[in-house]
Amino acid sequence: MDTTDAPQVIEHITKSLNYTPYDARWIPCSARFVSMGIHPRATGAINIFALQQGELKTVLELEKQHGVKCGTFGASSLDERQLAVGDYAGVMSVYDFEKPEIPVYSAQAHKSIINCIDGCGGLNIGYGAPELVTGGRDGCVRVWDIRVANPVVSLEPEQTEAVRDCWTVAFGNSYNDEERCIAAGYDNGDVKLFDLRTNTMRWETNVQNGVVGVQFDRKDIEMNKLLVTTLESKFRMYDMRTFHPSKGYAYMSEKAHKSTVWQGRFLPQNRDLFMTGGGNGGFNFHYPSSRTTQDADGILMGVGGTVELLNSRVLSTQPIVSMDWRYIPPVDNWKLTFFLSSADREGLCVLSCLDQTVRVYIVSKTHKY
């Protein structure tokens, strides 16, 4: 691996915390981010930090009744920028930081801890109504529209089958007002794809190891690439454009680190670049010369493609459990768009680490790929 001209992973700021962080999200169109986690006394922490002259300034500190496991701005409008979180008691709450003490929406989403949450239809990205999806220890995946009290879709294990932890969920395929899919990963290695338009399970497979992360390269286009990260140091990249009746979706598999690949995140400005968090590495995806090939019976099947390791760096002795790229979404006002584009720092990311730190890093030279 020649790293002479490769992207460099540069530490910008590290801040120690008095709680264990599990997730961090940039507040859209700002130089601030939200860190979420759990205090030693099992109460929840939601803190807002601002980048200010090379330092992190604490803007807001909230303590909640239960530990906070995950959060997203994905279903919020750019005007409101409301944060949806899932906690250890199975409650999903939506907070407006203008009045953060009481949530604007709250629901008992799961029987116990909410492991994961994702949003779609907000931030001027994609189509359709704003929706949230949660996955929990009870094995359920539920879709929420915060305009109504109950979930609009509830995907639950059958009574006869063993309940498996749902560890990760992601929206995708939202390329018009009707189409939308959910990918869900489970502790036994199952990956399931649910079609929300037809209300059916579109595809499922097993990757042999517990699935800790799934992400589509983009939510607002037809399914293209699906990144699946797992325990035991491997990830898979699925080509979601071509489905074979017997072989399913084509994929390539790669060993990323020496341990669990906790995160995999595509760079929003360039969906062929992605970073994994575990032992940390940045990868460049290469499309194959042809996206499809034919099997012996002449049926089209996908081609997995290849990935190239661009750089790798060990940042901490403890796992990095969340990562979020800073991204300026498209806005309607062209003057505001011009102003924001000048402030968009491609390659700026925030990491949550189990050594009780949040870290801001800059990944350089991403525009060259």
Image (cartoon, rainbow, N blue to C red):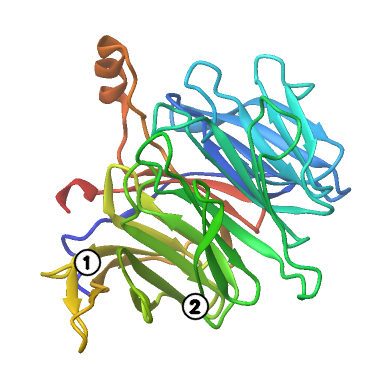
Dividing the picture into quadrants, the one containing residue 336 is top left
Q: Nearer the viewer, residue 147 or 120?
A: 147
User: Is 68 situated above or below 231?
Assistant: above
Q: How many marks?
A: 2
The reply, left or right, for residue 111 in relation to residue 271 is: right
Q: Nearer the viewer, residue 40 or 217?
A: 217
Name the quadrant of the N terminus.
Answer: bottom left
The reply, left or right, for residue 355 in relation to residue 197 is: right
Residue at 34% across, 74% down: 251
Q: Is residue 17 visible?
A: yes
Under mark 2, the amino acid is Ser
Q: Residue furthest bottom?
A: 296
Q: Residues within 10 Å of mark 2 (few under 14, many from 20)?
A: some
Q: Position of residue 108 (x, y in %)?
A: 82, 41
Residue at 58% across, 73% down: 190
Residue denoted by label 2 = 233
Q: Position of residue 157 (x, y in %)?
A: 73, 65
Nearest to N terminus: mark 2 or mark 1: 1
Residue at 31% across, 11% down: 333
Residue denoted by label 1 = 3
Residue at 83% across, 54% down: 112
